[in-house]
Structures are given as structure tokens and as C-alpha cells.
Image (spheres, grey):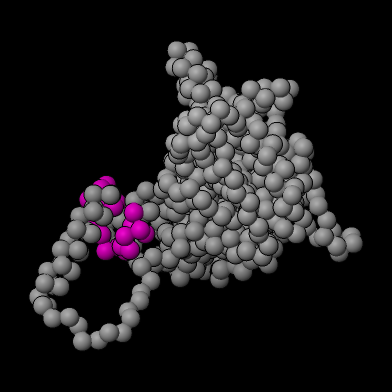
């Protein structure tokens, strides 16, 4: 590095470390500033020391320590939502972070994602507590950026129209003689935004612990953590709840007479979770669809024998990751084959913007959603392009989605794009149901429990049959009862005579 550029670089680094008082003293010394010869001009980019808000919208445009696919999934999430729940923070005020360090974990649309830092610096303020809903386009945190940063990166950090925090500025002369502004955080920005509970990480916990805390109506700051730096574990929560319940029971034993008041008492134990909130919104929209229900009983005896034969073969030599097949892959494939003859059940209805009239949009792929009961609530992952999959491939994909759903790791791609839904309550119980149509779909199938019942064969002999109830709900604005009944009869044929399904496979 030549002498002139070295002087400028050293001087910029020196000035970036000066406080206001030190800057005043330095300026009063009236030290002559080095000016390079006019024949040679150099440009030096100074370090930016500025407290800037990190916007939630930036998570769709920033850098990630995850794979490219996960980054694309996150962009899909941010594009279609207005808020995310803060699951947990990995940082706290006055903590230093480097580029790619994890900042927090957010959950929205039933998928959780970790947000990483785009810059190196010091965290000054967290705008949300864990469990709160963060708004898209609003600051997540304030970060004191330390290090070189391009103007376009700085503009992308705050976004257009973002309100900047108060700053004090000092002026520095560059080699070219132009004034360059260096931002220094004010004393107010250097203070922690909120009091930190006892222990360095006392307010942090795993998502499983936070779910337990919400379900039990416990405030995490009331629980004494025994983990590292005061972290709260499941055992800590259980110990706290046990002590709380024992106190309430001992208090109730002191009163042998019933209370004199008969007024109803209500209190909010826990707010709706992110999944419950999403269900509230989607089901509210679904109730604007005029439903009609069509139900019938199907004989599962033949498909039960076929399934048993297939599973015996898979037990000896598993195919891929499939060692056992349930009834669901057969039903999903049968529904897909019926959609080939009645594509209206795979369509969606929407108002045409050009004509302002309702129109049907037919879709080429059969993306069948499967309702699943998980510890976090009801979710509907989607098996894509079922018409091109075999029954074993459907079983493999179904197994993958069930494993991800149980661990809460489904991606936005796994949860989007459904064209029709199948819901099975038979493994829980119940025979009849009236399923609610999912938004942007026109039909849904609900399956009940398989029961062994006496029946008559063609020779009037009493035989055992395995019977399952199929309940269809359809959008009566575009689907009539006759169409639904004919499509249901096709599916009945595939279920009661599964060998005919083979002839339909390409």
C-alpha cells in the first residue's frame, strides 16, 4: 500500500474509534491534514459504525447459513404473510455477532426458519420478546454495524422509508478533499433495550419447552432455570407446575364451604398458537363456501387382503425406505385416478380479473393434501403430482411427510400447492364426519374407522366384511351432487376391486 493510501486508512480507523469528547479535543488541536498530490487520487471506504434496524422483510433477501432450497422456502413464507412468531432468540443486547451467526428462529405458516445476520456488529436492541408476533417490514432488532459495508447493502438493511434511530455524526476529510460522514451511536442506543432476567440466557428455551410453557399457561420468567446460564428445561417447567398446583390444592382445602358468588369467571390461559391462528383464518374463509355432503360405505375386504399380501413381501425385502404400506396410499391413488375422469374436482374457482366473473381454473397436477394430527395441531402437507407416482412411491412420500410433521420440520414447499384433500380420522375413532373444504379447493374426502360387520354375499350367506365410511364435502357452487356421486362410485370400484387399479396405471 502506498504512503498516501496508508495514511488515509490509518486516519479513518483512528477517527472511527473517537468519542464525541475525543473528537472535539482532536479537532481543537488543529492538526494539519494530509492532502495527496493532485496528480494521484485514491478512494478509501471508511468503516460504518451505525445502529441500524434489521427488518423482518430482509429475511427473504439476505444471506443464510442454510441450503439454497431452504432460502427459497423462506422467501415463499415471507412473500405470503404479514407476521411471524418469534420462537426463540439466539442473541441478546450487547452481544457481538459475526456474519452468518444465528439471530433468532421464527415460525409462520406452520414452518419454522432460523434467521442469520447479514453483517458483523453488536446487538443493541431486540424489538420483540420470544412468543410475540413480529410484523413483516418492521425492525426485528437494532444492530451496531462494524466493518465495511456497501451503500446498497446498507439501503437493503433498513428498506425504503424505514425510520432510522437517532444518531450523532462527525465529519472527516478524505484524500479527495470531500467530506465523509461517520455515524457514532448515541448513548441512548448503547443501553440495553430491556432488563435481562437472571442468568445470561434465562429467557431462552427450546421450541419443545416453549410449547409446554404455552400449553400450561406458565410465564418463562417465573421459572427458575437450572440449565447452562439459567436456561429453562422441561424438568424446570414440570417442577414449577407441580409446586404451583400443590399450592393451589392446599389453598382450596382450607375452604370447606362453596364460594358465595355464582358469577362466571373467565380468563385467557394461553393465546392461540401460530398453527391455531392460521387454522382460524383459513377455516373462517372456508365457511364462505356453500358445502354439501355425500356419504357412502365401502367394502375394504379385497383391498385389505391385497395390502396384507404386499406387506408380507415388504417384510422379507423392503423397497427403499418402505417396509409396510397402510390403506392411505391406495386411497390417494384411487382419488387421483378418479380426478382423471372428473377434473372439476381438481380445479379452483376464482373471479376472472378481466371479466369480473367467476371462472374455473383447471390444474394439470394432482397435488393431494393429507390432513395430519401432530403435537402442534392439525396440518395438511401435500403429496405432489400423485398421478405420476406408484403406490409404493406414495407410501414413501407419505412416510417422509409424517416424520417431518411429527418433528415440526415441514417446509413451506411441503405445505403448499394442494388441489384436493384427504382426511382420515379412522386411526383416532369415529365413523361419520363432515369435513370442511380447504380454501382454493372444491372437494375434500373424510374417512372413518374401518369396522368388521356381518353382510350377505351373492348367495345370501352371512359373511364378514370390513366396512369404511367415506364422507365427501364439495363446493355446491360448481359441483353438483350427481357429479360427486359418480366420482365416488369410481373410487368405490378401485377400493372394492383393487385389481382394476392396475389397468389404469401408466
Comparing 239 with 94, the one in front is 239
Comparing 264 with 306, the one in front is 306
Residue that lies at the very extreme toward the top in this rendered image: 316
Q: What x and y, as percent, mark residue 377?
A: 46, 52
The tally of labels here is 0
Q: What x and y, as percent, mark residue 10?
A: 56, 48
Residue 439 painted magenta: no
Q: Residue at x 10, y 78 (%)?
A: 256
Q: Residue at x 38, y 53 (%)?
A: 211
Quarter that holds the N terminus: top right
Q: Is residue 151 visible?
A: no
Comparing 339 with 11, the one in front is 339
Q: What x and y, as percent, mark residue 91?
A: 42, 52
Q: Is residue 450 visible?
A: yes
Q: Residue at x 67, y 22 (%)?
A: 502
Comparing 75 with 37, the one in front is 75
Relative vertical location of residue 392 with respect to residue 346 in this rendering, above or below: above
Q: What x and y, as percent, mark residue 67?
A: 58, 35
Residue that lies at the very extreme toward the front in this rendered image: 460
Quarter that holds the C terminus: top right
Whether residue 499 sits left or right of residue 252 in the image: it is right
Query: In the image, which residues are magenta?
Result: 212-232
Q: Residue at x 52, y 48 (%)?
A: 379
Relative vertical location of residue 128 with respect to residue 113 in this rendering, above or below: below
Q: Quadrant of residue 239?
A: bottom left
Amino acid at each position: 500500500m502506498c504512503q498516501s493510501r496508508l495514511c488515509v486508512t490509518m486516519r479513518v480507523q483512528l477517527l472511527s474509534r473517537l468519542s464525541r469528547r475525543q473528537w472535539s479535543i482532536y479537532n481543537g488541536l488543529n492538526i494539519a491534514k494530509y492532502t495527496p498530490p493532485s496528480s494521484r487520487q485514491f478512494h478509501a471506504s471508511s468503516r460504518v459504525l451505525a445502529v441500524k434496524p434489521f427488518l423482518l422483510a430482509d429475511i427473504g433477501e439476505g444471506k443464510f447459513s442454510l441450503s439454497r432450497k431452504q432460502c427459497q422456502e423462506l422467501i415463499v413464507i415471507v412473500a405470503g404473510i404479514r407476521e411471524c412468531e418469534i420462537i426463540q432468540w439466539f442473541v441478546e443486547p450487547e452481544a457481538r455477532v459475526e456474519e452468518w451467526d444465528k439471530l433468532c428462529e421464527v415460525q409462520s405458516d406452520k414452518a419454522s426458519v432460523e434467521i442469520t445476520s447479514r453483517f458483523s456488529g453488536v446487538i443493541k436492541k431486540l424489538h420483540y420478546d420470544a412468543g410475540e408476533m413480529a410484523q413483516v417490514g418492521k425492525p426485528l432488532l437494532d444492530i451496531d454495524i462494524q466493518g465495511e459495508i456497501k451503500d446498497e447493502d446498507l439501503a437493503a438493511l433498513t428498506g425504503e422509508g424505514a425510520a432510522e434511530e437517532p444518531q450523532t455524526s462527525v465529519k472527516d476529510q478524505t484524500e479527495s478533499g470531500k467530506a465523509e460522514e461517520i455515524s457514532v451511536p448515541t448513548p441512548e442506543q448503547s443501553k440495553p433495550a430491556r432488563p435481562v432476567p437472571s442468568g445470561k440466557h434465562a429467557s431462552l428455551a427450546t421450541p419443545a419447552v416453549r410449547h409446554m410453557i404455552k400449553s400450561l399457561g406458565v410465564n418463562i420468567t417465573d421459572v427458575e432455570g437450572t440449565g447452562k446460564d439459567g436456561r429453562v428445561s422441561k424438568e424446570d417447567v414440570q417442577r414449577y407446575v407441580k409446586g404451583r398446583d400443590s399450592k393451589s390444592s392446599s389453598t382450596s382445602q382450607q375452604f370447606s364451604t362453596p364460594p358465595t358468588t355464582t358469577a362466571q369467571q373467565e380468563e385467557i390461559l394461553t393465546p392461540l398458537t401460530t398453527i391455531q391462528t392460521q387454522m382460524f383464518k383459513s377455516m373462517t374463509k372456508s365457511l364462505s363456501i356453500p358445502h354439501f355432503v355425500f356419504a357412502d360405505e365401502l367394502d375394504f375386504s379385497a383391498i385389505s387382503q391385497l395390502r396384507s399380501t404386499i406387506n408380507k413381501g415388504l417384510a422379507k425385502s423392503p423397497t427403499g425406505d418402505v417396509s409396510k404400506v397402510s390403506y392411505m396410499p391406495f386411497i390417494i391413488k384411487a382419488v387421483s385416478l378418479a380426478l382423471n375422469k372428473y377434473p372439476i374436482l381438481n380445479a379452483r374457482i376464482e373471479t376472472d380479473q378481466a371479466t369480473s366473473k367467476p371462472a374455473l381454473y383447471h390444474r394439470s397436477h394432482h397435488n393431494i393434501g393429507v390432513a395430519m394430527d401432530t403435537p402442534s395441531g392439525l396440518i395438511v402437507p401435500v403429496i405432489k403430482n400423485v398421478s405420476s407416482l406408484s403406490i409404493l412411491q406414495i407410501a414413501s412420500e407419505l412416510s417422509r411427510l409424517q416424520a417431518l410433521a411429527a418433528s415440526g420440520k415441514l417446509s413451506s414447499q411441503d405445505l403448499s400447492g394442494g388441489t384436493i384433500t384427504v382426511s382420515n380420522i379412522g386411526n383416532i375413532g369415529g365413523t361419520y364426519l363432515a369435513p370442511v373444504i380447504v380454501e382454493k379447493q372444491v372437494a375434500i374426502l373424510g374417512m372413518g374407522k374401518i369396522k368388521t360387520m356381518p353382510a350377505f354375499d351373492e348367495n345370501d350367506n352371512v359373511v364378514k366384511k370390513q366396512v369404511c365410511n367415506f364422507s365427501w364435502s364439495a363446493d355446491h357452487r360448481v359441483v353438483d351432487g350427481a357429479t360427486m356421486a359418480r366420482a365416488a362410485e369410481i373410487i368405490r370400484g378401485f377400493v372394492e376391486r383393487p385389481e382394476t387399479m392396475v389397468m389404469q396405471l401408466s
